[in-house]
Amino acid sequence: MLYFRNDYGNGAHPAVWEALRKTNEVLTPGYGTDRYCRQAEETIRTLCQSPQAAVHFLTGGTQVNKAAICAFLRPYEAVVSAASGHICVHEAGAVEQDGHKILTLPSAGGKLTPDMLRDAMGGPFYEYSVIPRLAYISNTTELGTVYSAQELRSLGACCRELGVYLYCDGARLGSAMDAGGSQFADYAAACDAFTIGGTKNGLLFGEALVIVNPALQPGFRNCMKQQGAMLAKGRLLGVQFQAVLEDGLYLRLASHANAQAKGLAAGLEGLGVPLLVPAESNQIFPILPDAAVEHLRESVEFEVERKVDAEHTCIRFVTAWHTAPEDVETLLTLLKEAGV
Amino acid sequence: MLYFRNDYGNGAHPAVWEALRKTNEVLTPGYGTDRYCRQAEETIRTLCQSPQAAVHFLTGGTQVNKAAICAFLRPYEAVVSAASGHICVHEAGAVEQDGHKILTLPSAGGKLTPDMLRDAMGGPFYEYSVIPRLAYISNTTELGTVYSAQELRSLGACCRELGVYLYCDGARLGSAMDAGGSQFADYAAACDAFTIGGTKNGLLFGEALVIVNPALQPGFRNCMKQQGAMLAKGRLLGVQFQAVLEDGLYLRLASHANAQAKGLAAGLEGLGVPLLVPAESNQIFPILPDAAVEHLRESVEFEVERKVDAEHTCIRFVTAWHTAPEDVETLLTLLKEAGV
Amino acid sequence: MLYFRNDYGNGAHPAVWEALRKTNEVLTPGYGTDRYCRQAEETIRTLCQSPQAAVHFLTGGTQVNKAAICAFLRPYEAVVSAASGHICVHEAGAVEQDGHKILTLPSAGGKLTPDMLRDAMGGPFYEYSVIPRLAYISNTTELGTVYSAQELRSLGACCRELGVYLYCDGARLGSAMDAGGSQFADYAAACDAFTIGGTKNGLLFGEALVIVNPALQPGFRNCMKQQGAMLAKGRLLGVQFQAVLEDGLYLRLASHANAQAKGLAAGLEGLGVPLLVPAESNQIFPILPDAAVEHLRESVEFEVERKVDAEHTCIRFVTAWHTAPEDVETLLTLLKEAGV
Amino acid sequence: MLYFRNDYGNGAHPAVWEALRKTNEVLTPGYGTDRYCRQAEETIRTLCQSPQAAVHFLTGGTQVNKAAICAFLRPYEAVVSAASGHICVHEAGAVEQDGHKILTLPSAGGKLTPDMLRDAMGGPFYEYSVIPRLAYISNTTELGTVYSAQELRSLGACCRELGVYLYCDGARLGSAMDAGGSQFADYAAACDAFTIGGTKNGLLFGEALVIVNPALQPGFRNCMKQQGAMLAKGRLLGVQFQAVLEDGLYLRLASHANAQAKGLAAGLEGLGVPLLVPAESNQIFPILPDAAVEHLRESVEFEVERKVDAEHTCIRFVTAWHTAPEDVETLLTLLKEAGV
């Protein structure tokens, strides 16, 4: 079976694996207080050009979004997100479980703009309503679209103007950086906090949370622990992040995944297959005749996004750091055979 | 430095490591829906002689306690625990964060008895009070004491009589089974739910939650996801649990740790060192003169439990599956040199 | 000043007042365990033709919605509501504060239909999403529109078919019953739970919660107390509800309010004033030129709903049991003077 | 039946009643934004000599404790309370429902001392524990004991030194002021926030929350609304508080209740009846032979506190602003007849 189901279907990149292997028998203190985490935190601060940033390592994306939002907001403060945002549709109500409403904005491509934020967060607000205080974006978005460095700057300026927080979920940050020409430092400059996703880009698991805004830093370790989000053998996270960040591997892996997606998108275009949204990163959403979708199932793993009309279905192909160019070719051949 | 700080200071046992290595490049669906998790779940059901049990894999102990208690109780229902219970003192208020009060019972050795449960959970209860609905125990306890198989049966019978749930936190279940002569099936018979701890007994990370009571099974996967407790590459948990459970390694590792602790306790007894509680499993709590404690710091890693009087301190030594017998000998020699 | 701001601007109806006065010096047990509450509960069960219903008295509308939803749902279960629902926009995130997501459906008139419920609650659902379990409606709606008895029956049948709960917020139930030809028993037949609003129809304060579904009854008093929603002198609620329900006063008051609104709507129609939604109950939403709105401010109290275009604003007039017919006449005269 | 069950068994004091009557037909804006609330807030600020204090009116004691603590603390911050505190035993887990742990301190008389606070709140604290941030006291306590003005000052100084909040639940503040010689201004000087209880001292219902610490003031109205704790006809609270506070009635009522309790306690002493704790305010806890308790039940309403030994029971007598001196005499006679 060809695997285009997602970008967390395998284990660790060999370099990550080797770093874990080399340190496997070292004895360290627990909960991320070890030297490997210290080193990886420092690496991240340097990459971000943000020497005062607080860096924390957590195991998963829902976990880090939930813990951060819970730590940052007061009870009546709310989040603003595109309706397609991961926290809105793929986290089983994790943010609400901690007491916070998410106000959703319709957005065809899954992105927010400064104008949308001004409308939603500019007020006036009343005592009988929640107060939107944090703008949630993800880069890349759930639909694979990408904010450029310039767009991040505009959102950051807008949020400062409004007196609200900008939080970027970077579960696929590498892909976004490669596709949108942004640097770690752009996120540190624009956002109050953001994450660097490891799970989908070479690690066994792991998301780094970078809290840039000093007002949001105190107490986060207590919140992590209270959320059940502090890994006992925390050094596993530090070791892995250091392995991908110390020499640029993180971006090389994302770049490879994006390149495979670009090839796939070009092939689909050649076949005249429409896409739900333009292909910008490592997720591609082709709209296919139902018969073709059924045909593909026999030899390809993928997710179904949704039915779009009586005879067509939008599916999702995801490429990853380990996707072989030949697999893209084979997939395109299969699509041709399916009569697309 | 000698390492007696805790039992999660290193990485994975070689057999666990090898199992992860062999499967590292296999592509699977995410979130624990893979064949490795299926296999490990089945292994656990078999060991538990509980074919209808639901088995879930989570990454950490606080996380699994929090998710289970939140899933099992209604808003006004409360937990009863020994005051020294992990959920009371080492989880940063994780259970309360989800809305549930913990009623604490003083217990010198950290254990609960049926009489204590009858007093605390037998009622009558009033509309202005919480209703205690779940008895939390851990085996081993935070103080290293152990419930025997018979004690588990008595607690289970008592809870059924009272109409409340019995939940056993098995972060150190292997150590408890080795020390107390209990089997997996004893837990499945006595408890409504319990955990099998991996983090402290050979795994990189991982706790298995066994939900025996069918009434508590529905919806748990949604709760896990909502809690941020569903690992994307969930197969890492299935692979690791299968590796330690398929051939009894789990118990052999725990038995080794307990044996080292027994040797250490015997040596301490020979030196006339008093213990805070009798040594029953892999945690030993000697009470030492402060000067000796300071001397030890130079060459041994350990945790301080608490000051017991002006001149003495109770510290904690923990042995693990990787503790070398020679390290125990060296530690005892150091204690002698320290003039204990 | 003419008062068309809302229907909770004054105190109690004379009959309610007199009932409170007569019982003021009686000494009773607290928290609604008194004979007045018993009597009012029985009156409600009889009116509802629902002898097994549980009846509880709370002080306010947000409080009762919040307490009921929190009591009825498991952590990952969600509410479905029209986007204009009171719980979505006027309760400061009260439902989310207790952990539950509200899924909102666009609805021009603020009403839900069986088809909307089937789409939103029919599934399939996934482990990574919340599970919609309770349909929230209010009668009348936030926009003053009304569900008829037949519509209630259809919604109830649909919810039973889907295996979800139907909850009706009856903050303005009297107005809905008068306008839509529904009886208390229609609500008991269609809904799993509903409220009978007192605050806006003659009482100083008070909402009665009728829990028809026996599965939702246990533990509600504990939830009430935990929510801070159990009034110490609970008999004040029983006394008031008995006063308006024992002889039909509740409906007569609502009928008066509706009649005034009908007169007002007819007058507005005569003036050619467009309404945001058709006038069905005691809330009227005329769209007026901004200049006319400004003119009215000098002599009328009302709320602004929203700007509708550059030169027009939708405002809200509310009539109540104490609205004098002459005030409606005067208001219409003022509107004419304002050049509407 | 003689009524010594509690101090919220009747309705409103005549002066409060008259104030409600006079304003019953006035039309005002809702939610406490009316002129009566403004006036009562100002009266309270003046009495407290605290012109910058924020004053809010809520309906009940559990509600105000819950809303305040939820608004003041971050997720991992905890409350310290005497084990007998109202929030610990009589609020059905209301504080925990909002996510906060209560750390309980044993205290025979229900009071906290600066030394107890230093021990419990002085640290050090760890990332795996909650951080105690708010000291909860009530004056009078659940056992009727009283903090003097000097004791309040000491607690206030201690809390400032520790960097924690002091919160005083004043459900029976009048009784405490009368018994302990404290003034409203003493509470404003010592506490970060405190309540003035109306329900138990002449009002139909109502607690005023005085937030002295400016850092705790922002956003409280949103929290109130989110908690379902904002009364629609909020002016009912302002009217009532103004009625008892404008001319000292509040203290006169409390003084009457205390005087009746003092007479009762003297009579009990004369009969040689032991008390659970010294009688200081309007709650008396005599320890009586079980036979006498049974005898009393025929003609007196009271609460049972608890069995103290095989043959004795501690019961509770509460006096109120409306307790007649003759009722105290009759009660003492009944006790004599019962052979006490």
Image: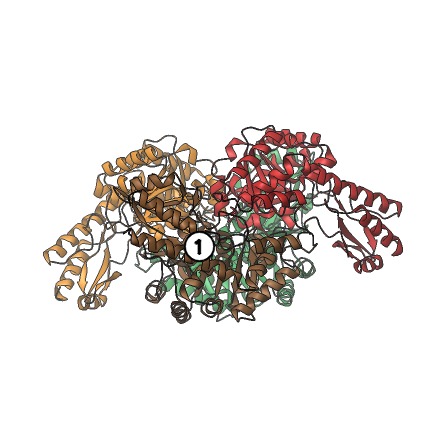
Chain colours: A green, B orange, C red, D brown
Left or right, residue B311 beside residue D335: left
* Mark 1 belongs to chain: D
What amino acid is labelled 1 in the image?
A: His
Q: Which residue is mark 1?
A: D100
Q: Position of residue A172 (x, y in %)?
A: 54, 54
Residue B30 falls left or right of residue A310: left
Q: Measuring 70% from the left and 54% from the top, which residue is drawn there? A: D27
Name above or below for residue B49 compared with residue B309. Answer: above
Q: Position of residue C92 (x, y in %)?
A: 60, 53
A270 or B319, nearer to the observer: B319
Q: Nearer the viewer, residue A89 or D233?
A: D233
Residue B258 placed where, x, y %? 21, 48
Q: Residues within 10 Å of mark 1 (few under 14, many from 20)?
A: many
Estimate the x, y position of residue D129 in percent, counting from the top left: 37, 58
Q: Out of D279 and B269, give the one closest to the viewer.
A: D279
- Kindly indicate the quadrant of the structure image that contains residue B43: top left
Instruction: Give the total number of marks visible in the rendering.
Output: 1
Q: Is residue C199 visible?
A: yes
Figure quadrant of residue A43: bottom left
| Residue at the spot 34% in from the left edge and 56% down from the top edge | D266
Q: Secondary structure at mark 1?
A: loop
Q: Is residue C130 visible?
A: no
Q: With respect to residue D299, does D27 lie above or below?
A: below
In the picture, the quarter occupied by the C terminus of chain A is: top right
